[in-house]
Amino acid sequence: MSSALAAAIYGMWQDTDRVFAGLSEADALERHGGGSSFAWTLLHIAGFEDGNFNARVRGAERHPVLLDQFSRFRETPGSADNWEQVQEAVRGLRAELRGWLDAFSEVEIASAMAPATARQPAQPLAYLLWRDIAHAYFHIGEVAAKRGQLGDRKSTRLNSSHVSESRMPSSA
């Protein structure tokens, strides 16, 4: 059984998928209203997970598609060029991370540390997981609002059924 924090990550992934669901390739790649494309926003969300959990904590190589898309489009921030490839890469990354997170107990997540980087000190894994959730929900709100402005209201409804008081960690 995975930890409550891992379950919160999985719930956040469900909400992320819901807000991006049904986008056509053209809509996903277009920069609506001068902001980032939906595809780039999904890359950005997954990039946090890839960099912090896959590379920093696990010591694995970054996902090649996510790294390629992210690196190439630093020159043109907010753009991406292959929606299906982005979605497949995110699914692959999540499958790897789910297997990794499922192995942690509550105690292990609470005590695990991410190593220091050139820009960050060593940090608790739990902190990075909560930060990932907060970061993703910021962008989920951004995408939902943007899609709502474009007239797509059905994608703006989130499902909080994956969050219950019994699964939330205590504040003690």
Image: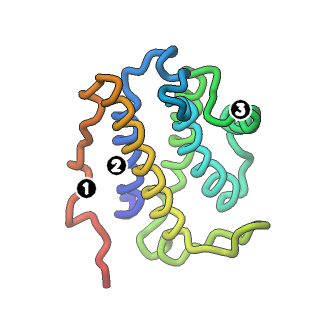
Res. 158 image quadrant? top left
Residue at image mark 1: 163
Residue 26 is marked as none
Residue that appears at 69% across and 59% down: 56
On the rendered image, what quadrant is the N terminus found in? Answer: bottom left
Q: Give the camera-side residue of 45 and 107.
A: 45
Establish if 44 lies above or below 2.
Answer: above
Q: Secondary structure at mark 3?
A: loop
| Horizontal and vertical percent position of residue 107 | 44, 76
| Horizontal and vertical percent position of residue 137 | 40, 50
- The Cα atoms of the two marked residues, 2 and 1, are separated by 7 Å
Residue at image mark 2: 11
The tag earlier along the polypeptide, 3 or 2, is: 2
| Horizontal and vertical percent position of residue 73 | 71, 33
Residue at image mark 3: 76
The tag earlier along the polypeptide, 2 or 1, is: 2
- The Cα atoms of the two marked residues, 3 and 1, are separated by 37 Å
Check disc 3 and give the amino acid type.
Answer: Thr
Check disc 2 and give the amino acid type.
Answer: Gly
On the rendered image, what quadrant is the C terminus found in? Answer: bottom left
- The Cα atoms of the two marked residues, 3 and 2, are separated by 31 Å
The tag earlier along the polypeptide, 3 or 1, is: 3
Q: State if disc 1 and disc 2 touch (CB < 8 Å).
A: yes
Q: Is residue 41 left or right of residue 116?
A: left
Q: Give the camera-side residue of 96 and 65.
A: 65
Q: Is residue 146 left or right of residue 125?
A: left
| Horizontal and vertical percent position of residue 168 | 28, 67
Q: Is residue 150 left or right of residue 153?
A: right
Residue that appears at 48% across and 48% down: 98
Between circles 3 and 1, the one closer to the viewer is 3
Check disc 1 and give the amino acid type.
Answer: Val
Residue that appears at 54% across and 21% down: 30
